[in-house]
Image (spheres, grey):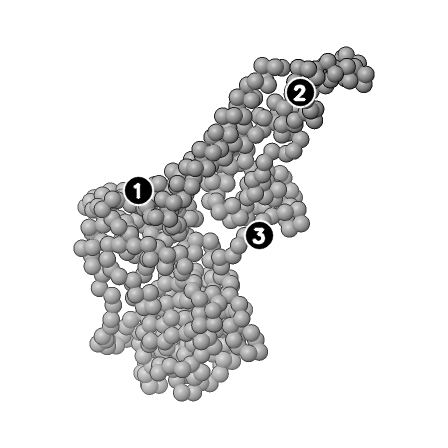
Amino acid sequence: MPGPVFGHIPGYPVGSRFESRAELADAGVHRHRQAGISGSATEGADSIVLSGGYEDDQDFGDLIVYTGYGGRDPDTKQQIHDQPFAVWNRALAYSSLQGLPVRVIRGEGHDSLHSPSTGYRYDGLYLVDDYWQERGRSGFLIWRYRLIRVPDQPEDRDAEQSEAMSSDAPFEAPRHETTGMRIVRDTAQARRIKELYDYQCQMCGTRLGCLAGPYAEAAHIRPLGAPHRGPDTPDNILCLCPNHHVLFDHGGVEIGEDLSLIGVTGRLRVHPRHRINDEHLRYRRDHYRANNGEPAEEPEIPTAGTATHLTPAEAGRLLGKSSHEVRDMLVRGELSQEQVDGRWLIPALDVDRVLNPQRPPAENRQKRPLIKNRGPKNRRKRKSKLRKNLSSNSVGDTETSAIDGRISGLAAEVSYLEKEIERLNDERRRLKSGLMSDEKRRRIKRLQAEKKRKGKKLQELRTELSRQEKRR
């Protein structure tokens, strides 16, 4: 099958009729004979068919909320699992990212006032304005695409006019008076937010200075218009640079509950006078995921039975880290790399250790001598018992090795507790940097109590370690 062809197909103007999917495919208007989406994940989607195949489709004429492909039972046509972000679903998203037009064909099977009574009809070019993920009527995750009709498209005319349009003679495109509806954005609201941040991006801090003045873009957390119905108010507006605006709109970056950025490194900067609605952030997280479009699932902990080595990207997804953070972990020695089939991969056991931190191995922990009654009265008895079993040299070696073992075990536990306290400090700083809530305050209080308990234990271990080193 040849690659996708974007735009109108010569000889088939808007309003052309077709009796079957086979006729559509032969004309090149929609090349796939079964799937509702035609195109390529790497080149984009060039056409879709709206014929009532999915229960969540919505057709408002110039605005269509289209359901992605997959997840249906081939016999019952009911949705039985989540839709993957792959192949044709990814193709429509690519068309949105690149601004490629999509041909829309309506079929008789769709319950809509805009569908033909028989056969199929080519209804012109649309642009994929937005896409997101949500739960459909059947309770499974589906991909939704909002398509908006390109204005001022020529309608189908009689044969004489169609022939004149296809001739070499110059032809002036007919003009039609149309009435459209669009969302009127409050530019004053957006301008106030930009001025509040001095036109600096809330994600990266970049300030673009142009000849006419600084430049930034206003991004809505919950999108405006159907079906999102987000408000054009300051608590729903962010000040972003063009790069992060594109990433935010297309699921490349997400804002966590603590305002940390998911998908890129950093944290959202929030001015004290800028209150952001948590409900809008939650809606954004539920519908636009920053995980390359994959449905959110519990990551499988890598073990020797599932995978022996992982790519840095796979390790980052399991650990919830960005590529920069994974690289920093490799530099710090928290993760290692091994060459497998010419590629540098991360051992799955290293990822498992980070996901499931454990206490030091038993052989490195402090070992208590199994000797009772260690008072001065029994010292002679212990020494005489040792002389019967071991020579004097072996006794000295035994005592030295016992002390070394205790020192090694203490050092391992001290190192472990130091890392735990450092982790608690990092988590506490992260929680205090964002907007405070009762839940965050309770979490910070628990972290402080845990840090105090572990700090006391660490001090005791350091004292014991110093005492054992002096004995040696």
Q: Is residue 126 found left or right of 152 in the rendered image?
A: right
Residue at 36% from the left image edge and 76% from the top image edge:
59
* Amino acid at pointer 2: Arg
Residue at point 34% right, 44% down?
434
Residue 320 in percent (x, y) is at 48, 47
In the image, 290 versus 88, the foreground residue is 290
* Cα separation between marks 3 and 2: 50 Å
Within 10 angstroms of label 3, few (less than 14), some, or many (20 or more) residues? few
Q: Which mark is residue 300?
A: 3
Pinpoint residue 425: horizontal percent, then vertical percent.
42, 35
Q: Image point 31% across, 41% down: which residue?
A: 205
Work out how far the residue at label 2 is from the one at label 1, CA to CA, in angstroms. Answer: 68 Å
For badge 3, the amino acid type reads Glu
> Label 1, on which residue?
206
| Tag of residue 374 | 2
The tag earlier along the polypeptide, 1 or 3, is: 1
Marks 2/1 in contact by CB < 8 Å: the verdict is no
Amino acid under label 1?
Thr
Q: Position of residue 294 (x, y in %)?
A: 49, 58
What SS does tag 2 mark?
loop
Q: In the image as oriented, which residue stretches furthest toward the front?
A: 377
Compared to residue 317, the image places residue 420 above or below, namely above
Query: Quadrant location of residue 411?
Result: top right
What is the CA distance from the residue labelled 1 to the residue labelled 3?
A: 37 Å
Measured along the vertical axis of the image, is residue 453 above or below residue 241?
Answer: above
